[in-house]
Image (cartoon, rainbow, N blue to C red):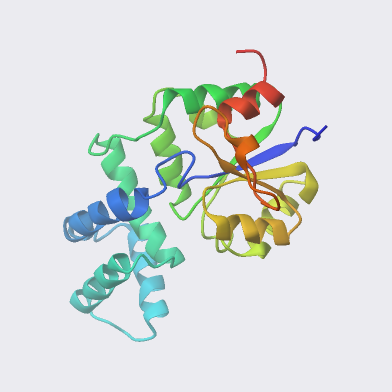
Amino acid sequence: MTPTPRAIVLAFEGVLAPADVLAETLEPRAREELGPFLEQHADDPLVKRTLADLRAYAGRDLDDAELRVRIDAWIRAGQDISPLRQLQGLIWTEVLEQGGLRPELDADTVAALTRLARADIALYSFGATPVTTQREWLRRGPDRNFEARLAGYFDTRLGGRRDAGSFGRLVAENGLQADQVLVLSPDRRQLDAARQGWLRTARPAPEPDAGHADPDGEPHPALSLNALAERWGTAA
């Protein structure tokens, strides 16, 4: 029998939010709000520091207008640049707090993951979306208390989502062993990176559980959240 994991790493984009949430929802909203946000928060120390980091990343001393054009181009290209994600995160968190975005988080997903958390399996969220936005997204979902049930949140400051070293750092920072951790993501490149670090991997399957339909040799079995909750979680 497969041993119960001590922790499950959930891909924020693909498990806790739609897989295309960045490209289809968050990034277009960041581009729309960028100008007004920068004007309203021109004196905010955190915004100033983030813009300074972006100027440094650009490799030249851009003026405000040039930097705004460069930021817009980076967002259009879906770049995983840490200070860019942090700036977008400030925008997204503000929009969420103001009710300008409605998180897409299924109540059944929350229920299944809550059963796993109550069974003392640590749940971690890892995504390109900044931690502050991940947390606010879950707070605005069907169960406001669900955000606090996760043991930790990680974003690109940990490293790339398709970098085996990122998963190694996550494991080490939380005092775990690689084979005690299951990574659940629809992105095969993320799962391949996790497997390189000797973590266990699975793809989220639609209900009912499609785990028995995998072809021979499939390294990342498809498992539904309900199947995981039935196997390792508390009673419903």
Q: Is any part of residue 37 visible from this angle?
A: no
Where is 73 relative to 191, above or below? Answer: below
Q: Is residue 214 left or right of residue 198?
A: left
- Comparing 211 with 24, the one in front is 211
Residue 233 location (% of width, % of height): 67, 22
Q: Residue furthest top?
A: 236
Q: Quadrant of the N terminus?
A: top right
In the image, residue 142 sits, relative to residue 28, either above or below, namely above
Looking at the image, which residue is at 31% across and 84% down? 61
Quarter of the rendering containing residue 192: bottom right
Q: Quadrant of residue 182?
A: top right
Give the vertical position of 148 relative to 173 (above or below). above
The answer to whether 218 appears left or right of 179 in the picture is left
Q: Residue 7, image x and y in percent?
A: 70, 38
Task: Write the residue at 72% across / 62% down.
Answer: 196
Q: Where's residue 197, x and y in %?
A: 73, 59
So how many labels did they put on this image? Answer: 0
Give how far across and how far down residue 35 sits, in percent. 18, 61
Vertically, is 30 above or below 5?
A: below
Q: Does residue 122 show up?
A: yes
Picture residue at 46% right of the left edge, 55% below the top: 128
Q: The C terminus appears in which quarter of the rendering?
A: top right
Residue at the spot 42% in from the left edge and 78% down from the top edge: 57
Q: 14 or 176: which is nearer to us?
A: 14
- Residue most toward the bottom? 60
Position of residue 73 in the picture relative to residue 10 (left or right): left
